[in-house]
Image (tube, rainbow, N blue to C red):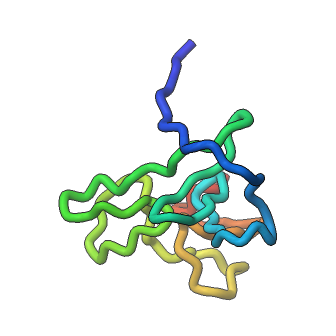
Amino acid sequence: MTVTDHPTAERHAHTHGPGCGHDAVVHEDHVDYLHDGHAHHEHDGHYDECTTCSCADCTDTCATCTCTSCTCETCNHNVCACDNCSDDHQCANCICADCTCATCKHAA
């Protein structure tokens, strides 16, 4: 068994979800909630901090990174190439149910 370390966010007085008052961003296989300068998502009954961009000049979270020359593997700034995706979604945030884009993180 492999154990993966993940930073746990501070305790919250409410459960994040639709209408909780925090912006939500789809990031790969989860939804991050943005507030107080950070992003986190629910995991096994607690909230984990989202990963931070590994680019040398960036300190943003991967869920909200806007580096123009991003090389971080978890920040995917490619635009969805799926014919079913009518908006110009970034691959990291694409929510097509039947996505065929090879660079989208959720594509099969």
Q: Is residue 102 left or right of residue 73?
A: right
Residue 12 in the image: state x and y as whole percent: 67, 49
Q: Position of residue 49 (x, y in %)?
A: 51, 47
User: How many numbered callouts?
Assistant: 0
Above-or-below relation of 59 to 86: above
Residue sitting at 47 percent across and 68 percent down?
Answer: 64
Q: Residue drawn 74% across and 36% down?
A: 45
Q: Is residue 42 left or right of residue 90?
A: right
Q: Is residue 107 visible?
A: no
| Quadrant position of residue 28 | bottom right
Name the residue rendered at 72%, 51% in the picture: 13
- Residue 96 spot, x, y in % from top left: 73, 70
Q: Residue at x 67, y 38 (%)?
A: 46
Name which quarter of the figure residue 59 lies in. Answer: bottom left
Residue extending farthest to the top is 1
Q: Does residue 20 appear to the left or right of 41 in the view shown? A: right
Is residue 104 visible in the rendered image? The answer is: yes
Residue 46 vs 12, above or below: the answer is above
Q: Residue 24 placed where, x, y %?
A: 65, 68
Q: Nearer the viewer, residue 108 or 68?
A: 68
Instruction: Specify the quadrant that holds the N terminus.
Output: top right
Front in this rendered view, residue 97 or 55: 55
Q: Nearer the viewer, residue 36 or 56?
A: 36
Q: Residue furthest front?
A: 13
